[in-house]
Amino acid sequence: MKTIFSIAALIILAAGSVSAQNFNFDRIYQDAEKYTVAVDLVIEVSFGMQTTEAESRGIGAVVSSDGLVLFDGTSVNSDDPLSAMAGMQVSAEPKSIEITMMDGTKYPAEFIGVDRFTKIGFCRITASDNRKFDYVKFRGRGKFRLGEWLLIYYLLPDFVTPDLGADIGLVSANISAPEEFVLTVGFNSLQLTSIMYDTSGNAVGVLGNLENPALSGFDASRMMESFSQFDDFMPLLGLIDAERLNKLIENPPKQGKVDRGWLGIYLQALTSDIAEFWGITSPGGIIVNEVVKDSPADSAGIKTGDIIISLQGTPIEVNKEDNLPIFQKKISEMGAGVPIDFEILRRLDGQIDTLDIHVILAQAPISPAEAPDYENDDFELTVRDMVFADYSVLNLERSFKGVVVKEVEPGGWASVGGMFPGDIIQSIGGEKITSVIDAKTAFARLAQDKPEEAIFFIYRDSKTLFVNIKTDW
């Protein structure tokens, strides 16, 4: 058995050696070093009452003459599915970004945002000399062949010279579901966002990661179940292609800007057992468990109990709960204002009617990480506006108002006084609080009056209570 394995390994190595002759390493390297950069970030990571700083270094690429840079944004991605739980979201924000060119020149950069699907981050170099930069141009091409070889130049540790090392891998599969993705072998997660070149020397994309859709939903219990499966930890690395990259470069994601599409339903998968029980022959679908009032679904006439079986004429083959995020992602990526057509089954008086429903998607509600916030230095806490996820997770009526305690500094007035992340402040010193603007005004009044204690009326664990916080002006 060991002999067979050794022979197979030798064959692969030999094939790699032959394929390497097809790459013009010197020419590609000369191009790569013009626009490949090192991206050094200092990130402030906050979770409830804990705040710390972390450093991250990775590879990036200049993608426009005015200094737009893409990089692996995983470390600054705050779109955490558990972030709505009790307001305890993880916040990871870049405090500083430094770009180092391959000739050693360093520039500061301003953070722009992270694409929530590819986890590619963007920043822009702030050069005082208005320099025009060399940049990579990604070239689209046809289908990639199984066994086709691809080359990357990846970032080496900063204590060695040269800065870049070469690596090759091959196309192992053209994945069609849950999305089209060119899977590769031979690369590793430390090389993410390295530019990928074909044997003609064209920059055809960057190295990315295909995520398990079951881990991208907002159902915490489903996420915890998935954590027990080893397969979910196996990275699927491959090509984020030129077409997708060029769209992102043309319109980079901006922090705090929401452009995701939103339908406004709570949903369940049409499993084979449910389909059989109801006498439905569809290979899958989306069961509408609830329709959000005044949402696009509500306006279009979708009702609780409806079963969505096709989107834009394509069958929805969602037949298990783990695949629900595939449908959610499609809706989200379509964007706000996009018209879409559904085919829907509606059960009524023992009959099943088929309906065609036209919906115009709205802008998705902002996430907790995107909500406006306010930090008060006196009480050493940060509050944010309530968002849709808060009402959903806590089962609150939309008439309920307040601000969510996002962070509490250990040892500060708020911490000593018994305030916790996730508390919802409804009044401060008798003043009704409906937004961070109200909270800012109330805190300013406390700073002016300087009372010996401040009384907060809060909502915690499905009940209300008063919290008296001693002050030391």
Image (tube, rainbow, N blue to C red):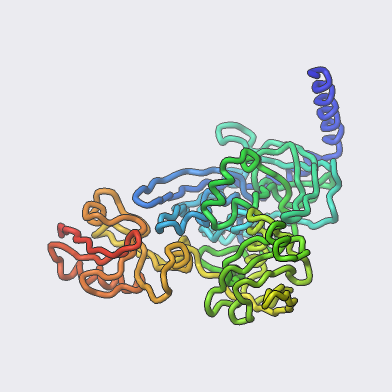
Left or right of 201? Residue 466 is left
Residue at position x 73%, y 69% from top? Answer: 311
Name the quadrant of the C terminus.
Answer: bottom left
Q: Determine the residue located farthest toward the left in the rendered image.
A: 452
Q: Nearer the viewer, residue 158 or 3?
A: 3
Q: Where is residue 109 in the image (x, y as percent from the top left)?
A: 52, 55
Residue at position x 71%, y 54% from top? Answer: 136
Q: Nearer the viewer, residue 41 or 401?
A: 401
Looking at the image, residue 292 lies above or below residue 271? below
Q: Position of residue 377 (x, y in %)?
A: 27, 59
Residue at position x 73%, y 78% from top? Answer: 355
Residue at position x 72%, y 42% from top? Answer: 152
Q: Which of 206 and 260 is in front in this view?
A: 260
Q: State whether residue 106 appears in this view.
A: no
The quadrant holding residue 294 is: bottom right
Looking at the image, residue 80 lies above or below residue 168? below
Q: Where is residue 398 in the image (x, y as percent from the top left)?
A: 43, 74
The quadrant holding residue 160 is: top right
Name the quadrant of the N terminus.
Answer: top right
Q: Determine the residue located farthest toward the front in the rendered image.
A: 350
Q: State whether residue 348 appears in this view.
A: yes
